[in-house]
Each structure stands twice: as C-alpha cells, then as structure tokens.
Amino acid sequence: MKFSGLKVIGQALTGHKGWKPLWRDPAPKSHYDIVIIGGGGHGLATAFYLAKVFGKANVAVLEKGWLGSGNIGRNTTIIRSNYLLPGNQPFYEFSMKLWEELEQETNFNSMVSQRGILNLFHSDAQRDAYRRRGNAMLLSGADAQMLDRDALREMVPFLNYDNARFPIKGALMQARAGTARHDGVAWGYARGADSRGVDLIQNCEVTGMKIEAGKILGVETTRGFIGAGKVGVAVAGNSSRVMSMADKRLPIESHVLQAFVSEGLKPTIPGVITFGAGHFYVSQSDKGGLVFGGDIDGYNSYAQRGNLPVVEDVLEGGMALMPMIGRARLLRSWGGIMDMSMDGSPIIDRTDVGGLYFNGGWCYGGFKATPASGYAFAHLLATDTPHDTATAFRMDRFERGYVIDEKGVGAQPNLH
Amino acid sequence: MLIPHPILGPRDAQEFTYLGDAALMLRPDPTQDNAEAAFSEYIYFRDNPVGIHQELWFHEQGDRSWLVVTRNTTTHEILSAELASDVKRKQEGDQ
C-alpha cells in the first residue's frame, strides 16, 4: 500500500474502511542472516537500510515490548547537525540529509519540520566558541549563521535579554535543523522494512546469546532460539545489560533524562531554542504543547523516571529564559534511560566476538542520529566496513586515546 | 532521594555530587606489567548493573566526606551509606 494525497481523500469519502495494518506480525523463523536486537528507532532504521540499500531481506528485528516503545517514543524530537569535532559533525550532517529525504524514502509522513535551532550565547567567549562551531559546521557542508542580539530579538522577542547573570548577546542558528514526529519516524521505518521482507518480531525478549569458539550462532529469546549469521545490538539505554550476555563490559553508564510538555498553546515558539548556560531547551509541538528539558539527573538509573531536583532546575531555567512560560501549565513529565558514554559520543563497531556488532552510547543525542545510525550500522553489518562518516565511532578509541569529547570533560559520563 | 549519612543522618541528595561506581576506589597498581590495560579498563569501563549498585557520592555542600552509597538503580531506593574511608580501611584489612 502506497500512501498518497489521493488515497487519503479516497478513504475519507469511503469512511476510512480500507486502511490495513502497517506491518505484519510474523512468528520468528529458526534462522536469519542478520538479527537486530532492539525494535526502536535505530534498530528499525538499520533494518530499513539493510533491506533498501544493501539488499538484505533475510533479516529480523527482535523487540521485547512493542515497536518504538523505548527512547524513540520518549525524546524531545529535535533534529540538528551542529556538532564541532571532525569525528562527529560529518556523521550528523549525513543524518540531516537523510532526514530531509526521509518522508519520500519511507513514503510515510514523519512530520519532519525544518523550523531552525537557536543556540544562545551570553559572553564574548561563548560567541567565539559558537563562531568556531559554526565554521566547523560549514566545513562539513551544513548551514550555520551567527545572529546578533537585534536579529535574534526580531525573531524571538519573548526572551529575557537582560537576565542579570546570563544576558543574551546573540545565537548560533542552524536553519535546516528542526523537529520530527518521533513515533512517525519509527513507524515509517518499520513499515518500510516490513514491506521489503524484514520480520519485525515483537514481545520477543533476548535472554541469552549462543557463542561458540568466539563466534555468535544465535540468540535465546522468550519465543525460542533464533539462529543468526550476524547479530546487531541496538538497544541504547540497556546496552550494558544486553552486552553482558556476551560477557562484555562497556564504556557506558545508564542515566535517566527527563522531559516535559505543557498544555497545548497557540503557536508561540517558532523553532528550537537552547539555553545551555541555564540547562534548558524548548520547542513547540504541532499539537501546541511546549516540549522542553534540561540536564540528566546525574546518577546511574534504569528507572525511566527522574527526581524532583532536576524538575526544579529545568523549570528555573525556563523561567530565567522566557518568563512567560510561567503562565503555562505543565501537563506531563517522563524519563528515558540514556547510554552515557565516557566521551559523550556513540559507538558503532564490531566486537571481538565474530558476527556480533554493537551500536550504542548515544547519550541524550540518539534521536537526531536515527537515520545515519541506521544507515551506518546497516553498512557495517552488510559490508563489514564502517560507513565513511562513522569511522571514528570505534569501541577501542578509549584505550587508543582517540576519544571524541565535544565538551572536553573527560571520562565522567554525568558531565557530558 | 535522602542519603543516610553515617555521621549527619538523612541528608538531601542535592547536597552531594555523584562520581560513579565505587569500584573507582580500587585503583590498579601502576607498577604491574599490564598496568596500561588495567588503567584503561579502570578509567573507561563500567559494570553498569541493573539493580543494586555501590557508588561514590561526595558531600560537597556538607561535611565534604566521600560516601559509598548502596542504591537500587531500578527503584532509586537507597539501602545504606558508609564513609568511603571506612570502606577503604576494610578493603585494606582484607588484603
């Protein structure tokens, strides 16, 4: 079934009785060429690109809950490519380009909206740092623009420009950044993978890995043993938990990050605004809710919910940046579990177990990376070589001294 | 979260800063043959368990003591807290 405007009008006129489920619900086969653990954004994107770009259809995605039930359904939907370091920025710009063509590729409305992102600065030093970052973005082929205070005020007049501690002096803008409908991304990839023959197997938790003579032969699951030529793990949040089945320790701690949404309001915030100095960022969903968040709670957690001190910290940041937010009522808050890596950057790599591949360590930046992560992981699984933009994301970069530390804070995951 | 400080009684976790797994107290011996590999493992790799976790908290806005807190990472329940200096003394006693 192909979606089109004509199809929607036709269905509207006939009572919407002709829509079919977007994917099958197959029973697991006894063996697949490639098994992907994790039916979230990254796992589904991997399966989609494996089938579409690399011609691999004998593939299964195993998901312990329902598709998209993890972080792809819990994030704040921001897409951007405004990184600094050469190991990161080309990868995220590749992702941005995939976002721009995503809806045509998957024939699914993922509501990709390039409404722009503003990173605010408050001092000469921060202006210099953002100018450098903007130049790095331009070098990678991304767009970047410095806005002074007057240009910024014209665009977002409602900010508190004269905050005593952090007066706003301007912003680094990426106009091509924006938001996407997070669930729609998962569903688009799932449907695209399924229609190309990938088996999406839900309620199928991996409980063990069968490894013999240094090679993986398959996985034990709650729905029986499933043999596999290759196994790709894409379970960020639970990476340490799953990789411990292969007796692997990772350079990762799991932390909880909270997010918040207000009641629905009329259009008020044009794009994404980040107030790094105040640990606060905000955008407005198409439904009208202000979607915002701040820092991780800062201690190891698998709880998918945070504590009140960070709620207070985030809301204080919001009040400092745009006092009008105090008139909005908070509707919901929730938490998601982040793979916080030791340098703040992800890992897409082989392991020393033959046929076992790992994708994780996305910190709180996994959503924007979904398309490129899937593409690069599919590239690695299909060809055994890393994608050109993902060569730096190696597991052994820590011991070799090639960390990709955007913030330069060292091996302290709760500071990244 | 309230941390039961062994000297000061229950204290708000906001008074503390978090370092990480208490295994960081077991620093490798820099003179041993595989010291380089041992230090890379020590600095970068973690058990990151689901459930009971022993971890280091620093009472920065209090008496500036280091504590080893035993906490459940799935429920945030804090089970106990000891002075890190006491834990260290016990570890050295074991050797």
Image: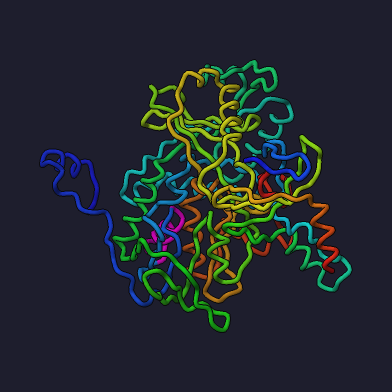
Could you tell me what secondary structure mostly forms the magenta stretch? Answer: helix
Question: Which is nearer the eye, A232 or B45?
Answer: B45
Instruction: Tell me if A15 is positioned left or right of A33 in this view.
Output: left
Q: Could you say where residue A171 lies in the image, as x and y percent from the top left? A: 61, 27
> In the current view of this chain or complex, which residue is farthest to the right?
B31
Instruction: Tell me if A347 is positioned left or right of A190 in this view.
Output: right
Question: Which is nearer the eye, A138 or A365?
Answer: A365
User: Total marks drawn?
Assistant: 0
Give the magenta part as a residue range: A41-54
Question: Which is nearer the eye, A197 or A264?
Answer: A264
Q: Could you say where residue A51 lies in the image, as x and y percent from the top left? A: 37, 64
Does A49 appear in magenta?
yes
Say which residue appears at 45% left-offset and 51% top-offset: A70
Instruction: Tell me if B12 is positioned left or right of A174 in this view.
Output: right
Instruction: Tell me if A341 is positioned left or right of B94 in this view.
Output: left
Which quarter of the image is occupied by the C terminus of chain A?
A: top right
Which colour scheme appears in the figure?
rainbow
The part of the image, by quadrant, that contains residue A44 is: bottom left
Q: Could you say where residue A132 lies in the image, as x and y percent from the top left? A: 68, 37
